[in-house]
Image (cartoon, grey):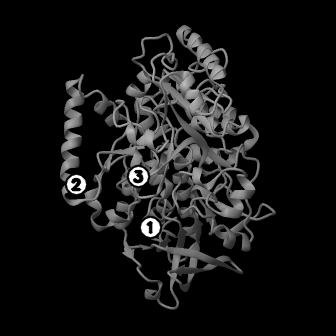
Amino acid sequence: MKRLDTLQALPGDAAFDLLVVGAGGAGLAAALFAALRGASVLLVEATGHVGGTTALSAGTSWIPGTRQGAQVNPDDTPAEAARYLDNAIGEHAGRALREVLLAQGPATVDELEAKTEMRFRAYPRHPDYISDLGGSTLAGRALEPLPFDGRRLGELFALLRPPIPEFTVLGGMMVDRTDINHLLGMTTSWASLRHAARLLARHARDRLGHPRGTRLVMGNAHVARLLYSLAQRAEATLALDTRLVELERGAAGVDAAVLEQRGERRRVRVRGGVVLASGGFNRHPERRRALLPGIDIGWCPGAPGHTGEAHAPAEAVGARYGEGAMSPAFWAPVSRRTRPDGSAAVFPHFVMDRAKPGVLAVDPAGERFVNESTSYHLFGLAMQRAGAVPAYLVCDAAALRKYGLGMVRPGGRGLAPFLADGYLVRGETLADLARALAIDPARLAATVERFNAHAEAGHDPDFHRGETAYQRNLGDPAWPGPNPSLGPLTQGPFYAVRLYPGDIGAAQGFATDTEARVLDASGTPIPGLYAAGNDMHSAMGGVYMAPGITIGPGLVFARQAARHAAARAPASGKP
């Protein structure tokens, strides 16, 4: 892979088989799949880092029917996966795109593992989110990247977007769910102590020569593996800090683009096509106001490059957005804090706290409004429907010590800075906490009293928390009560953090066909224009029904786009 530090280094008649706009997970994959077919690729990224929001995520890919999935769930079938998708998505999206996902997903994974450094595993238990629907499974469809040694990237390691700092420990050590369990259990298990000791020793060595840990997991591992694989391909060229300004459409379709890098512009010709993978509209001010009214940009935990700037050039050549999605965005409850350097920390509450015993969520009136164990997407939607902005995630002292709360780590120590800046609110009694949150103390007390009674019985008649396999999986398997998701709040002091609905990715994007070709207003494909990742209208219709339903389709449709575009380029290799 060549690095293009200045567009002026391009010849005046520069031409590539493919131009890929955006170097997040889908963009890197599109460039890699095209390069594997012998196509020359120019990959441009508007920021100074590669990885996009994929680098900040858990890095899970939902792709049923794979060899890896069969190792943990040999009984799953494509028909059952299709049934689950039909039940979950309904009329929010047509079947054609998800049929491609099921048909091409296993081949996508196989090609990556055979020809690149991508390596996947299926976690032994990773349920579909709506696990009470017909066709759902408890494992086998969600694939995770294997950890990757970032030192193999050499100087490219500096280009990799770092993870959210609050998702790391000890000044930049990345940990996944396996590591977390071992770290929490290191005082009670020799196996956990050995695992933790290896992690800590590796991190200590890393910090002697690197600004952060180089043992990469989750989304950082996914992106690093794609980047490392692309770096081995002479067909690829990477340009950072480079924006798409204009697309040109000739008689045969989109055949040129105008790019801008640090004030300099350059026109490049494109033989096969342009793949839009810039991450979606989320940080575009006008589109955000239109599609996400009332949702503050400060609540968005996504990467900074998701500006939607590449969408206007696409619309100028006829591209249109898709319609019918359940929601224009995917959601998670987030909490916010200002870091010592003045930057904003936006923390998504995915799995670590809200579904655990001794924790509940209330609205500004002090009443429950949601099943706290539901998926983060449905939680975020429930906040908006109920007007619970902010909502409050409340726990007792025992839960805080055992599970942590948002950015507050388990253990119950080091609370002073969080209390001082108001991120964490404490009350010696529930009444004290209610007054600190400007909630009616009597109403909060009544809510907790009712919740506690149901928790003791192990049944939640109000919101049915902990009734599905997915919800119980988020609970505490060591909890002695009858339901691993339900436990009473009894031990003062009591704590709370404020929650906001944070958009974690775009679900509404450009309408495409099964080859990832962007459609015009008449439903006709625009020759030479493709979309993947969150620039593509959600194949899931904006329904977040399983882990990895953005990254998985991102890989599959990046491959679809690359194959089709490479075949259009007369100088490229095999389709």
Dot 2 or dot 1, earlier in sequence: 1
Q: Which residue is mark 3?
A: 163
- Decide: is 246 above or below 353: below
Marks 3 and 2, how far apart in space? 16 Å
Q: Tag 2: residue type? A: Arg
Residue 96 position, x and y percent, is 68, 47
Residue lying at 64% horizontally and 78% vertically, measured from the top left: 246
Point out the frontmost of discs 2 and 1. Answer: 2
- Tag shown at residue 35: 1
Callouts 3 and 2 close, C-beta under 8 Å: no
Marks 2 and 1, how far apart in space? 34 Å
Q: Secondary structure at mark 2?
A: helix
Q: Tag 1: residue type? A: Ala
In which quarter of the view is residue 224 placed?
A: bottom left
- Count neighbours of disc 1 (C-alpha within 10 A) and say few if under 14, some if 14 to 19, many if 20 or more: many
Residue 160 or residue 441, whichever sits in front? 441
Residue lying at 48% horizontally and 16% vertically, measured from the top left: 490
Q: Secondary structure at mark 3?
A: loop
Residue 566 position, x and y percent, is 54, 69
Q: Which residue is mark 2?
A: 207
Q: Tag 3: residue type? A: Pro
Dot 1 or dot 3, earlier in sequence: 1
> Which residue is most to the top?
457
- Decide: is 153 above or below 92: below
Residue lying at 67% horizontally and 50% vertically, measured from the top left: 295
Dot 3 or dot 2, earlier in sequence: 3
